[in-house]
Amino acid sequence: MAHPSSRRAGFSKKAQFSLFTGYLLAGGGALLGAVLLALSLWQPEAFAPLRGVAGEVVAPVGSGTAVARSSGQGFFASIAAYFNAGAQNAELRRENELARIRLAEADAIAAENRRLKGLLGLRDGESKPVAVTRLVGSTATSGRRHAYIGAGSASGVQPGMPVLSERGVIGRVLETGRNSARVLLLTDSESVLPVRRATDNVIAFAEGRGDGLLRIRLVNLGVNPLKVGDMMVTSGAGGYYRPGVAVAVIAKITPDGGIARLVAEPGATNFVSVLPVHQAQAIAELEAPESVGDTPSPAPTSAASASAAVPPATAEE
Amino acid sequence: MERLDPRARSDIYGRRINRAPDPWRVRLVPYASIMLASVLPVLLIADTMPLLPSLGFLLLLAWRMVRPGLLPLWAGAPLGAFDDLVSGQPFGCAIFLWSLAMIAIELIETRFPWRGFWQDWFTASVMSVVYWLASLLFSGASLTPEMVGAAAPQALLAILLYPIITRIVAGLDRFRLARARTID
């Protein structure tokens, strides 16, 4: 299509000026955008209040679509379940038997644990969730992996609090609005979480790769003790997460650790609970001297230099 | 006349006598549709990978190509600001890139005044791939090969979606100009 003739300036001074003004405004917009982009890359939390307002608008609509989404997934899952029902039933029966035995053992261990902790005088208080809410949606177009939840500072949600589903860790609260909050998902490439193997004390960092998987990097290098199928849980180092929450299962072994698949997929999650920061006082004390020195702590790049006290996802702070 | 042919006094925008397009609809539909397209991907999917291309940007391109001169040259900045609030990109990314895109299309249009569908598709494809790469670079995360690999389907989808989106925009344009107001 050719230009509509009204948009050719010709000799009309007025048309020439309005065309020029259009270019000027558009150029100014681009320049403003570049400045804002530089500012928000330099200070990521600068525009958090603005985004909080937008989140307020998105969250109520999103909770509606979240219902449709989860029921839709249930629909397809129930069709799929008809196909290998018989074999699955027998398998599940056997697993249930085993699980009952293990549960009884776990009860015994929990009781012993309580007794031993009582002897030590160590009181690890049960942390009650700050809020239980819906996972409203996530950024589906950006390379960053953020999600929205339907609870905000009005329900006591603060930045830094861990967000868990009934299966395991989802992520960490990044910004809060009044009735919504933005969550940094584990798979975001800026997310770092200290983990350990569930069965023993092999310590590692779980870093997001940005493609839905986690890279597990061992702190102590040497012979790689990980095996495919190992469960990684939070180690509690850094003080943000309660220790022992499921994070990921190793899917592939690499020289310095492994590639792991998430236990709690955000796509299959409907409700999440926001827990208080596990060791809030310790973190406050840790962060106090940093603010005096005014040096933003970078993300732990080498596993050797990263001590156990590195909080997850420091680059976002 | 109506007895002979019921559509004699109407066109694709509806009956002509005694009717006029709704002034609010004429102005608001392009902006509202672009903003809705910015929000839509956030609402529909919660997943571990980026999946959809930026629908808001694709709709902006389509409105600009299908109806040249409807969106002012500076429209990229305010619409981009809204997109930044919900897309998860650092604030300012879409303001910058959408403004640049609007200027670029304007320059291309002055250089090649007679354009066709294939050329429009080519321009939109190049622009959406450049936009995809630039928003990955500006996302604030350090770029890893895995991230680019995971995001590659987005670029492909953006190219393939353009013809469909221009059809949607053409439909929205008919809705925009439909003679909904009765003049007494």
Image (cartoon, rainbow, N blue to C red):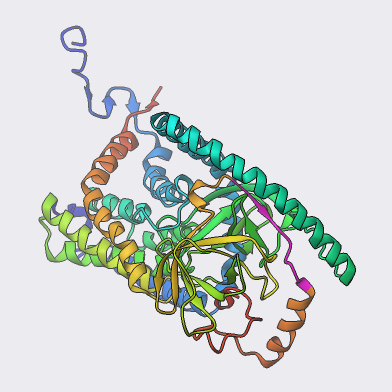
Residue B159: horizontal and vertical position, in percent? 22, 55
In the picture as drawn, the residue positioned furthest to the bottom comes out as: A293
Residue at image location 29% in from the left, 65% down from the top: B101
Vertical comparison of B178 with B37: above or below:
above
The reply to whether residue A253 is visible in this rendering is yes
Task: Tell me the quadrant of the picture where the C terminus of chain A can be found.
Answer: bottom right
Q: Is residue A97 left or right of residue A79?
A: right
Closer to us: B101 or A194: A194
Q: Is residue A279 magenta?
A: yes
Asked where in the image residue B156 lies, by quadrant, the reply is bottom left
Closer to us: B37 or B68: B37
Asked where in the image residue A292 lies, by quadrant, the reply is bottom right
Q: Is residue A48 magenta?
A: no
The reply to whether residue B100 is visible in this rendering is no
Closer to us: A141 or B75: A141
Q: Is residue A251 left or right of residue A17?
A: right
Residue B155: horizontal and vertical position, in percent? 27, 59
Asked where in the image residue B153 lies, by quadrant, the reply is bottom left
Residue at image location 42% in from the left, 66% down from the top: A210
Closer to us: A133 or A228: A228
Residue A3: horizontal and vertical position, in percent? 17, 55
Residue at image location 71% in from the left, 82% down from the top: A287
Q: Which residues are magenta?
A: A271-280
Residue at image location 33% in from the left, 23% down from the top: B18
Residue A208: horizontal and vertical position, in percent? 47, 68
Count of numbered circles on the image: 0
Q: Is residue A119 left or right of residue A271?
A: right
In the picture as drawn, the residue positioned furthest to the top comes out as: B3
